[in-house]
Image (tube, rainbow, N blue to C red):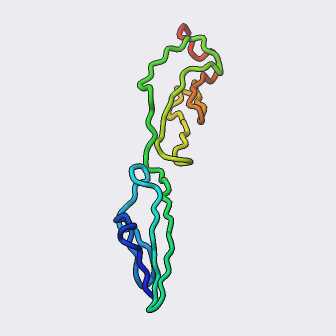
Amino acid sequence: LERNAENETSYGKFIMEPRSGQLLLTNQIDYDTEQRVYLLNVSAEDSVHVTFVTVRIEVLDTNDLRPEFTDLPANVELPEDAMNGNFVYQVNATDEDVGVNGIIVYLLLSDGDGKFTIDNETGRVYVLGNDQFDFDL
């Protein structure tokens, strides 16, 4: 039994092992810059008969792009009487990955000695605690 993926539809990305029928990738596919669906025409034949099938290959995104912040650098002025829960600033980032790979989670790596908190989903920064900014003390 012989099998093959027709050359005119293999896109230079796939080859088929004629004896096993295994379809192999010959070059890496980049979801972000190349087509995302490939249709391969495959035939199988014995000494008398031939049959055909179309194999549909869908390329899935991987988490290969890092988020990027917008509107930076940020300089924010905050009154010393800012109270617990007061909104300070909203950081924004985008990620070109698709689906769950493009979901952004915001974290504060330094919270100003416990004076700030961030909403992990929205990037909104808030004051945490009361009377912590009184510079007259």
Q: Is residue 129 above or below residue 37?
A: above
Pick out the residue farthest to the top: 136
Q: Is residue 2 above or below residue 69?
A: below
Residue depicted at 45% across the width and 74% down the height: 42
Q: Is residue 83 left or right of residue 34?
A: right
Residue depicted at 47% across the width and 84% down the height: 50
Residue depicted at 46% across the width and 40% down the height: 67
- Whole-percent x and y of residue 135? 53, 10
| Quarter of the rendering occupied by the N terminus | bottom left
| Quarter of the rendering occupied by the C terminus | top right
- Whole-percent x and y of residue 31? 43, 53
Pick out the residue farthest to the bottom: 47
Q: Is residue 109 above or below residue 47?
A: above
Q: Quadrant of residue 103?
A: top right
Residue depicted at 47% across the width and 82% down the height: 44
Front position in the image: 39 or 91:
39
- Whole-percent x and y of residue 128? 62, 24
Q: Is residue 2 above or below residue 82?
A: below
Q: Is residue 95 left or right of residue 27?
A: right
Front position in the image: 44 or 78:
44
Front position in the image: 84 or 101:
101
How many dots with numbers? Answer: 0
- Whole-percent x and y of residue 85? 65, 21
